[in-house]
């Protein structure tokens, strides 16, 4: 198994060479579209993403994904996610509903989705059924 904890991949990080590093930590409501385009072209995207997942990075764009997207990616790929907190944007919201529907369509159970979005199994089920879909 690769050692994602090793730091040498950072030598090739595109974000180290372009613009403002704070752009990778957008505030609430700010877009991350531009920095995610940089990540998409980054040669070390994979080790960057795995480093963030294995360290439970709470904030910022890593490997082109937000924290919520990193948790979803880990869940969908069976990667243990070391999350011992909930990020501020983890509160239920309309975007969360879209994520629940997406994960359900990909075959995750209500309980597994709950682990991703920080909700109970029943809460996820209620939110899903309120969209008009069947269980
Ligand atoms: S994937 Fe994105 S955040 Fe990670 S090293 Fe590359 S540019 Fe930086």
Image (cartoon, rainbow, N blue to C red):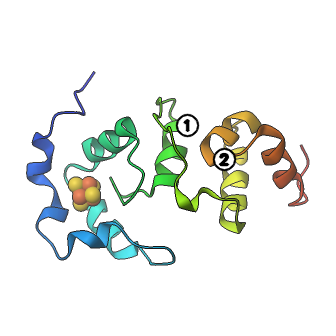
Whole-percent x and y of residue 67?
46, 53
Pick the front one: 134 or 6: 6
Q: In terms of sequence position, does the residue under pointer 2 or pointer 1 come before the other?
A: 1
Real-space CA distance between mark 2 and mark 1, rounded to the nearest whole angstrom: 9 Å
Instruction: Give the structural element (helix, strand or loop) at label 1.
Output: helix
Q: Mark 2 points at which residue?
A: 103
Asked whether residue 115 appears in the rendered view, the answer is yes
Q: In this rendering, is residue 91 above or below 71?
A: below
Residue found at x 84% / y 41%: 122
Mark 1: few/some/many CA within 10 Å (<14, 14-19, 20+): some
Whole-percent x and y of residue 119?
71, 45
Horizontal side, residue 100 vs residue 1: left or right: right
Give the quadrant of the C terminus.
top right
Pick the front one: 66 or 46: 66
Whole-percent x and y of residue 58?
42, 51
Instruction: Give the structural element (helix, strand or loop) at label 2.
Output: helix
Query: Can you tell me which quadrant of the image ligand 1 is in?
Result: bottom left
Q: Which mark is residue 75?
A: 1
Q: In this rendering, is residue 113 above or below 32?
A: above
Give the quadrant of the N terminus.
top left
């Amino acid at each position: 198994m690769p050692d994602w904890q090793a730091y040498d991949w950072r030598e090739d990080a595109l974000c180290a060479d372009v613009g403002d590093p704070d752009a990778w930590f957008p505030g609430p409501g700010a877009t991350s579209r531009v920095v995610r385009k940089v990540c998409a072209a980054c040669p070390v995207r994979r080790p960057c993403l795995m480093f963030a997942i294995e360290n439970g990075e709470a904030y910022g764009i890593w490997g082109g994904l937000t924290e919520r997207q990193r948790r979803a990616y880990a869940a969908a790929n069976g990667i243990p996610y070391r999350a011992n907190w909930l990020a501020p944007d983890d509160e239920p919201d309309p975007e969360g509903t879209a994520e629940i529907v997406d994960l359900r369509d990909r075959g995750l159970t209500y309980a597994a989705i709950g682990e991703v979005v920080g909700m109970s199994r029943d809460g996820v089920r209620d939110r899903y059924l309120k969209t008009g879909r069947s269980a």
